[in-house]
Image (cartoon, rainbow, N blue to C red):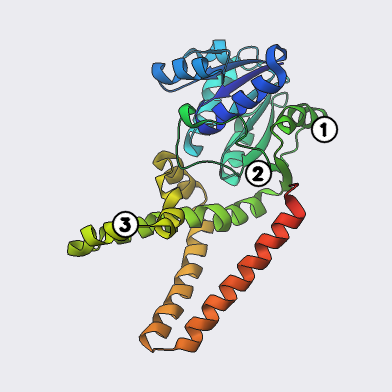
Amino acid sequence: MKLAIIGVGLIGGSLGLCLKEKLGDKIFIGGLCRSEKSMQLATELGAVDFASPDIEKVVGDADIIYLSPPVLQIVPMVKKILPYVKRGAILTDAGSTKKYIWQELKKILPPDIYYIAGHPMTGREKSGVAAAKKDLFKNKAYVIVETGAPVEAKEKLMQILRLTEANFIELDIEKHDRCAAIISHIPHLVAAALVILLNHSGEDLESCLKLIGGGFKDTTRIASSNADMWADICMTNGAEISANLREFQKILDEVIKAVDNHDRQFIHDYFIESKTRRDEILETVERKFDPN
């Protein structure tokens, strides 16, 4: 099996580490990185067998090509590699938005090169191959989106991806982008907003910094994520993100009104509803999806 990883960062690097541990010499992994430093590190860490800036060398004989750059770079990258991709090869990706990518790729892909959309719902606040972990995908949701690829191609890809021990879920494209906006995209925007709010505290900033504890750190952890990646996500899932931000704004407006009116009962019920529903959600998720 020959695998090419385009973008050997946190996600691509973690996949490489996992597969090399599980398959060893049964898989040969080539990597394309943005810098010489990243290529050297990816090789030293064992995420890839070799790394090169030469696209043809990386993808030329690959059975599976795993695309893991920021979302807006995926389609331009496919255009670059297509002249060197062999017939029957499988393209898959780790993009956090799916509709935009598929709309563009189906215009350019020949019928004998197959795209199977994917989205591993995992990550860390750190980025780059140095942050990669061989068990990053384990027990995490991994969405596979139907794009009409042959059953044989899908099974070939899944034989590799199952080695990550992720929890695989199949969704249609529209539902994926709606759900990803609520579960992933909005939380990142809110976390970033909380950090910016702190930065707007003016002369109180130094005192606020002295008070920072676990609550602020936990709530804003994902604000340290890769800016390029998240800017691209917002550009490619804008309708769903803006719609949910407006709904979020309505909720905050109700809270502001209750606070201004000293409506303790509303605020109390607000927290009760949130706690009760969160506890129910986590219990359901753990019961249905967590094998541990």
Q: Quadrant of residue 183 in the image?
A: bottom right
Confirm or deny contact between disc 1 and disc 3 (CB under 8 A): no
Q: Which amino acid does label 2 sit on?
A: Lys
Q: What residue type is labelled 3?
A: Ile
User: Element type at marker 3?
Assistant: helix
Confirm or deny contact between disc 3 and disc 2 (CB under 8 A): no
Q: Which amino acid does label 1 sit on?
A: Val
Give the number of the disc on residue 140: 2
Using the image, determine if residue 182 lies above or below residue 94: below
Q: Residue 71 at what x, y percent from top left?
A: 51, 38
Eye-nearest disc, 1 or 3: 3
Q: Residue at x 40, y 16 (%)?
A: 36
N-terminal label among 2 and 1: 2
Eye-nearest disc, 2 or 1: 2
Residue at the right extreme, as displayed: 151
Task: Count the marks.
Answer: 3
Residue identifier under label 3:
196
Residue identifier under label 1:
151
Q: Distance between the residues labelled 3 and 2?
A: 29 Å
Q: Distance between the residues labelled 1 and 3?
A: 47 Å
